[in-house]
Amino acid sequence: MDAEIKRRPYREVGATVPEVLEHKSASAVLRAVINNAKGEAISIGDIIEAFGERAFGFVLILFSLPNCVPAPPGIAGIVGTPVLIFGVQMMLGHKHPWLPGFIRRRTISTAKFKRLIDIAEPKLQWLESWCKPRLTQLFSAFGDRVVGLFAFLAALSVLIPFPGTNFPPSIALVIVSIAVMEEDGYLLVLGYLIGLAGLAYTVTILGASYHLIQAAMTSWFGF
């Protein structure tokens, strides 16, 4: 499979990405993806193809990063939906990411994607520099399913159109994904704690919104 990927040129993303994938550095992989991108836009399908049949960690980081920095309106829906699907696949025990055609055909501006990587790369490198194998018993087939559940819940929070509901779960998912790739249990626990705090905030916002709507309906219509 690797030899086939190296021989086949990508339509949007260069064939040097599989070589970088061997080093398992998220920051290096993302940099290779954008450095080999051509044209004004990159399709989600081309990005997935560049990663090949690899672990979910890279794609979870990639589609969570846009919600960790100021991003254009509507970006949450573009990147949140793939994370939701990946989460379900991980919960079901799938080993490789897959997306339906209508999502694979959606595109992201190359220039905006490059700016995102430029902002995120130093932070990812700093985080990676602190990683080392710890609490490795947390990483197993069952642990992957837990990460899938976490990704699913984080994506639901991202897709809810309320202020502040997308940043904490997204940054937590980036941390969790790096932790899984580096087998750093301490970092994994930190990511889960940040994510749970973000999900608690989302639930609080939803509850408050429900009560406000209920009070308004009672005031206006008497029921």
Image (cartoon, helix red, strand yellow):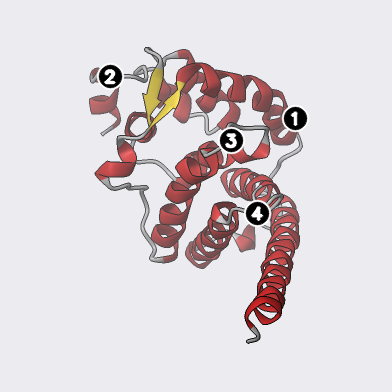
Q: Nearer the viewer, mark 4 or mark 2?
A: 4
The three-letter amino acid code for the residue at tag 3 is Pro
- SS class of the residue under badge 1? helix
**How much space separates mark 1 and mark 4, taking CA atoms?**
30 Å
Q: Nearer the viewer, mark 3 or mark 4?
A: 4
Q: Nearer the viewer, residue 33 or 164?
A: 164
Q: Earlier in the sequence, mark 4 or mark 2?
A: 2
Q: Mark 3 points at which residue?
A: 66
Q: Are marks 3 and 2 in contact (CB under 8 Å)?
A: no
Kind of element beneath mark 3: helix
Q: Residue at (57%, 32%) from the top-left corner?
A: 26
Label 4 sits on residue: 162
Kind of residue indicated by mark 1: Trp
Query: SS of the residue at dot 2?
Result: loop
65 shown above or below 55: above
> Mark 2 or mark 1, which has the lower sequence index?
2
Q: Given the image, on which type of amino acid does mark 4 rest?
A: Phe
Residue to which mark 2 is pinned: 11
